[in-house]
Image: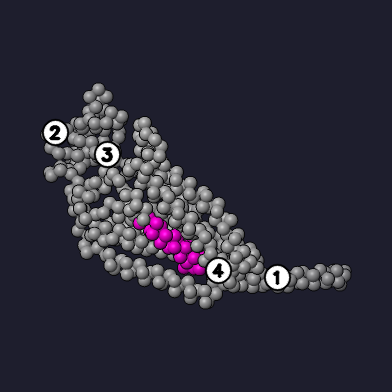
Amino acid sequence: MGAGHSHSESPPRANAATTRLLWALVVGVVAAVIVGAAVTWPSSWDRLGSESFLYEDARRLDAEVLAYDETTGESTVQVTTPGAEEERTMAPAGVASLTFEPGDEVRVIEVDPEQPLIFSDFARDPPILALLIVYVVLVIAVAWWRGLGALVGLTLAFGIVAFYTVPALFDGASPPVVGLVTSAGALFVLLYVAHGPNARTTTAYLGTIAGLVFTAIIGTWAVTAARIPGVPSEAEVNLTFLDGRLSLQGLALCGLMIAGLGVLNDVTITQASAVWELGKARPDLGPWQLFSRGMRIGRDHIASTVYTIAFAYVGASLPLIMLIAVYDNPVSTAITSSEIAGEVVRTLVGSIGLVLAVPLTTAIGALIVGLGGEAADDAAEVEAHGEAHGEAHGEASKDADHGPTAAGAEA
């Protein structure tokens, strides 16, 4: 029993020839990522933090609300500055629905020491930090080392976005190339740190890369043909004002690829695990049988994930949907309008990439498991377990046969 349990907990293995092929494919992908990163590597990071967020001579302060006048909307706040505390007046926020209560922690902007302070935002550090701590503790408590690996991988992946993707886009690099390099690089870090370097992880990685390639191809056509984005968002307008070299359509495509990464990864790692577990349970199944049974799981996963993507976008765009619904406009016109077409295209392209990634990942896993790699190991384990069970049964029978004799001798 101990040997069997140990084997089931060990990382999945493939035979030597399959392992060499898998790693050759991974090395090819990584080499392409390195070349793409070298070509699009930012020449400098000076653009980051180069624009002043406040007016000249203005400064940001932290304050606590002491009193709020509902009639005028003004507030009395206590401002803490280095070496001193003082009470100041904060001007009305300018939003009728925005009210304050004593004890609220706020961020304010001082333009002139003689004028009332301007409300900037609420201080949300404590609740967000508390949520982050709870999240990290729960992930590690439930998933143990896998959870810790996933958190480390996620941190490294965000580092890629912060220190490569954003500066490269500001530097005028090709957004589709940057999107592919970011996705493939971040995925490599995420998967191998969280799940370890084994055949199952490599299967998921290759399947996700295939899905990403199709997403990039289809997304490039869709973004251009549908002229996405038609009317830029406020953030995109500000970006083009700050740097006229940025392509809004290119940013839309790059964001589309990165946005679909998490869902693709979830689907492919699940499919790879499903095929391996099927191979463990039925070592006699060949590649086609494994693929057919794996796709039964994949179809359910596709169905659930597709509407997961759709509802995620609906939730994020709910205020916009409500605004469009107020006006007398045909549904077909509203859906294809510039305000909502971007979300529709993102949902459709992401879902197409997901649907294609499932059979590709399942096929790769079925070939690896069904052509003798993991299946042979499991068959050997079953045989070894049977022999061990037979020996144990023989010893028990022998003891049973000699038991009465020994008892009679003692008598």
Task: Return the disc, 3 or 2, that comes first in the chain's sequence.
Answer: 2
Other residues around mark 3 within 10 Å, as few (<14) / some (14–19) / many (≥20) = few
Task: Give the quadrant of residue 80.
Answer: top left
Question: What's the distance in space between the residues labelled 1 and 3, CA to CA?
Answer: 68 Å
Q: Which residue is mark 4?
A: 367
What x and y, as percent, mark residue 232?
A: 28, 45
Query: Compared to 152, does 342 lie above or below?
Result: above
Query: Compared to 169, does 321 lie above or below?
Result: above
Q: Amino acid at mark 3?
A: Asp
Of the residues tagged 4 and 1, which is closer to the observer? 4
Task: Return the disc, 4 or 1, that comes first in the chain's sequence.
Answer: 4
Question: What's the distance in space between the residues labelled 1 and 2, CA to CA?
Answer: 85 Å
Q: Nearer the viewer, residue 157 or 181?
A: 181
Question: In the image, what residue occupies the spot 80% across and 72% down?
Answer: 398
Q: Which residue is mark 3?
A: 121
What x and y, as percent, mark residue 9?
A: 56, 64
Drawn side of residue 201 relative to residue 411, left or right: left
Query: Compared to 347, does 112 lie above or below?
Result: above
Q: Which residue is mark 2?
A: 115
The main secondary structure of the magenta stretch is helix
Task: Return the disc, 1 or 3, that comes first in the chain's sequence.
Answer: 3
Write down the region rendered in magenta: 195-220
Task: Return the disc, 4 or 2, that comes first in the chain's sequence.
Answer: 2
Q: Which residue is mark 1?
A: 386
